[in-house]
Image (tube, rainbow, N blue to C red):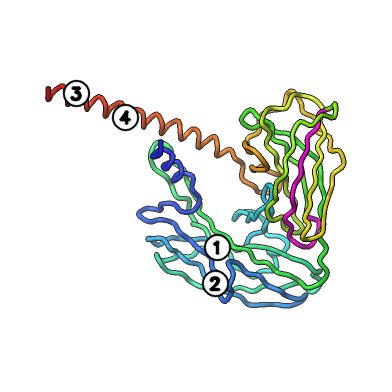
Amino acid sequence: MVALVGLLAVLVAPGAALAGNGEVKLALTPVGSAGLYFDLTMRPGETRSLAVELSNAGDAAIEARTYAADVYTIINGGFGARLRDDAQTGTTMWLDYPTDVLQLPAGKGIQQTFTVAVPADAGPGEYVTSLVLENDQPISGGGNVALNQIIRTAIAVVVTVPGQRSPGLTIGGATQQVVAGRSVVSIAVENTGNVRLKPVVTFALLDAAGAQVNQASVQMDTFYAHTKTFVEVPLAALLLPGAYTVRLTLDDAAQGVRADSAAIALVVDAAAAPAAGGAVGSGLTGTRQGAGEGQVSLAVLGLVLFVGLVLGGVLIGLIILIVRRHRRTRTAEG
């Protein structure tokens, strides 16, 4: 079982993958910056030249694609960078960073220069975009279960325009989806302010009679300015059809902003179909394929379970075969 779990980890791990006879290990490093990403303070109308190092720490040369991508907030907070075919909008348009496919030798890196130009009419606050580096062609897996992989790394480019900080939060509607036989409640939220936040989320679910069905309180990860996402709460069981009420609070004491929802109506339909994405477990966790949010569904969980069953069957077959051969050998020796 330990070997099986280890093999599954190799199949789904995003950090590295085998490409031919080599391993993909790509990295982006800001040049002339002490941090892990670009953290700039710039005034409206200012232009600045920067450089980033694109490196290949693997043991084989690789064709790598690099490009600038919009940043979004993933489910329950955190950094997300759009994919190569997604449109570039907003702060990404401030960057003069060419999309390019480069040949990166093993164990070496090259520097890519680019500029950031803040529009003259930019208001105060934080603006974020990203740089992405990934293998240009998918890596084909082998064996009975093959996964084609794109290994990508991304770093943020954060531009702070000096001026008044105006944090803001709003809470939208609630929906329910079914994942692995359990309900997952999703509530739309938006950072309407001009600074990133890390609010504490307090969730309560009440039935039609006003009795509390579920509650949770969890620290949300980074919620970027001018972005929308979802707070997603997996429940321990499947909700019965009927009318419910959701109450949600987002509170970032450090930034001095709090949002309290009114009673949010949630109607659970008896004919609700199981969702392809979502999460199971306790607390606030999981992902959702949000419209326009470019987020990755946890449908991969089903794939992992399938892979586990296949490999488990192979492992059991090998054990039976070894035991039979051992018995035959002992019989022959006897």
Q: Position of residue 41 (x, y in %)?
A: 71, 74
Give the mark nearest the N terminus, 3 or 2: 2
Give the mark nearest the N terminus, 4 or 1: 1
Residue at 70% in and 69% down: 159
Residues under labels 4 and 1: Cα distance? 46 Å
| Above or below, comparing residue 259 to residue 130 in the picture | above
Task: Give yes or no for residue 198 being in the magenta stretch.
Answer: yes
Label 1 SS? strand
Residue tagged by mark 1? 66
Quadrant containing the N terminus in the rendered view? top left
Residue tagged by mark 4? 319
Amino acid type for the residue under numbered disc 2: Gln
Give the mark nearest the N terminus, 3 or 4: 4
Q: Nearer the viewer, residue 80 or 68?
A: 80
Amino acid type for the residue under numbered disc 3: Arg
Residue at 79% in and 74% down: 120
Amino acid type for the residue under numbered disc 1: Thr
Give the mark nearest the N terminus, 1 or 2: 1
Q: Position of residue 101 (x, y in %)?
A: 51, 63
Looking at the image, do the residues carrying marks 1 and 2 touch, with CB atoms under 8 Å apart?
A: yes
Residues under labels 4 and 2: Cα distance? 53 Å
Residues in magenta, as a range: 191-207
Crowding at mark 1 (Cα within 10 Å: few <14, some 14-19, many 20+): many
